[in-house]
Image (tube, helix red, strand yellow):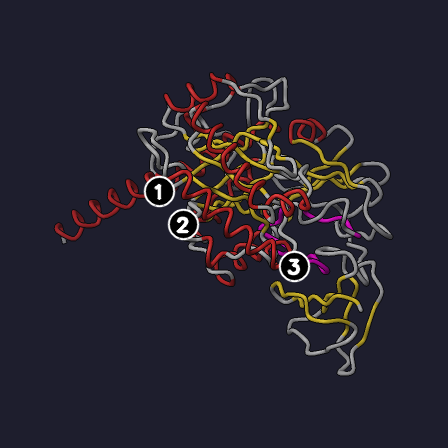
Amino acid sequence: MQKVKIFLIIFFIFLINNLNADCRILAYYPDWVSSYKYDKIPYTKLTHICHAFMEPDTNGNVSGPAVESGLITNAHSNGVKVLVSVGGAAVPSSTFSTIMNNPTARNNLINNIYNFCATYGYDGADIDWEYPQNSTDRTNLNTFITDLRAKFNSSPQPAPTWLITMAVPGDSWGCQYIDFSYLNSYVDFYNVMTYDMHGSWSDHSGHNSAIYRGSDPCTSANCEAYMNYIINTRGVPSQKVNMGMPFYGYEFTTTENLYDSCGGNCPANYTAYSTIAPLIGNGWTYYWDSASLVPYLRKDSGAGVMSYDNPASIEQKVYYALITRSAGGVFMWEITQDYISGTQPLMNAMYNAYINVCGATPTFTMTVTGTPPTNTPTPVPTPIRVNCGGSQYTGADSRVWLADKAYAAGSWGYVGGQAGTDTTPGDVLNTVDDTLYYTER
């Protein structure tokens, strides 16, 4: 028995040390927030930083990010790797398509990325193309990543093991032209954007980043579904996956309850956590969705629903990613958005949960527990949601389909537990969980 105990102790020490070596906690750091610069970054709580953004034009010429020598110096002195993030939502997908389809422009972009990293001491590049649109894009993206890896590997630098990472969506529509089976051999890890599940493009209010589907009657988008798709359906090794944590939310201004219809696209304001946190008790009431494991706020008077993450939900997400899904890491978009009077509540919650899994000793006191405060309204708000706000189609076999804008404008989603076999009114586009998407003819 004593030998067994000693073996178990040694085993768990080995396990913890290996978790600590393999776990990643990454922050996207934007260059446009003047009130939060490199000297505020808590380097000891990170393993990687993606400096956003280097923006290319159609010829592969680039601008940004603003170079901060202190960023590299402070990061490297704390063992943190810094990557330049290329692209972002502000760069049209068509710009990337043009670059990738032109060998001269493609090579120019590769050389610009390489020269930037070599000149300023960066540790690699994070590619954020939102999103490849067709099979030509898919082929050209493969070529680009292959050539970028070859360029990095040819570096005469003392340590030419530069990283290539990619920011990718978690749903099948956004990922349909990303060839993971090919890219897995060249990409070190993927930052999976497990957020933006509801917003101004939705026809109903809902959670920005639910862990589980919960009671959402219309949209199967949630962290569990996205991780299932990336790891199980698309075959990305779990150790190559970083799961995303949003440090922001959306204020739905025309709905009074979660899942209310907006009668069209929802007016929804992108809102940083630093703006959301002071609202609680000041005209807004806090609620915890125990099925989806995320909070939300309701305005005390009139319309207003705030979907967001707090320290408790961030903590739950880290445990879900690193333990339940055996993911290689977690990341935040983005590090400046929870900065409140010199503190970073979401950053601290994320780090504390990460450390609990990955084996180091916490360097601060956590004030949020894994059990969030509850506030059950009386009566409980009843989501007003009948048909997801879209037109309805009933197939020949009586299966009911609804126009659902959650994934793509004009797509059709089957409402039910089993995918139907109808071939009208459109062709099968893709599937996510129990929803089969059709494009209208």
Span shown in magenta: 203-222
SS at mark 1 in the image: helix
User: Which quadrant holds the C terminus?
Assistant: bottom right
Mark positioned earlier in the residue sequence (3 or 1): 1
Amino acid under disc 1? Asp
State yes or no: discs 3 and 1 in contact (Cβ < 8 Å): no
Q: Position of residue 157 (x, y in %)?
A: 34, 29
Instruction: Note whether residue 341 is visible.
Output: yes
Q: Is residue 272 left or right of residue 187?
A: right
Judge the density around disc 3: few (<14), some (14-19), many (≥20) Cα neighbours within 10 Å: many
Amino acid under disc 2? Gln
Is 439 or 350 nearer to us in this picture?
439
Q: Is residue 100 magenta?
A: no
Q: Is residue 403 left or right of residue 151?
A: right
Any mark on residue 239, and which? 2
Alpha-carbon span between mark 2 and mark 3: 24 Å
Q: State which mark lies toward you, 2 or 3.
A: 2
Alpha-carbon span between mark 2 and mark 1: 8 Å
Q: Is residue 204 magenta?
A: yes
Mark positioned earlier in the residue sequence (2 or 3): 3
Instruction: Note whether residue 313 is visible.
Output: no
User: Would you say the magenta stretch is mainly helix, strand or loop?
Assistant: loop
Q: Position of residue 58 (x, y in %)?
A: 65, 39
Q: Which residue is mark 3?
A: 220
Mark positioned earlier in the residue sequence (2 or 1): 1
Q: Which residue is mark 1?
A: 22
The residue depicted at 67 percent of the width and 38 percent of the height is 91
SS at mark 3 in the image: loop
Q: Quadrant of residue 149?
A: top left
User: Which quadrant holds the N terminus?
Assistant: bottom left
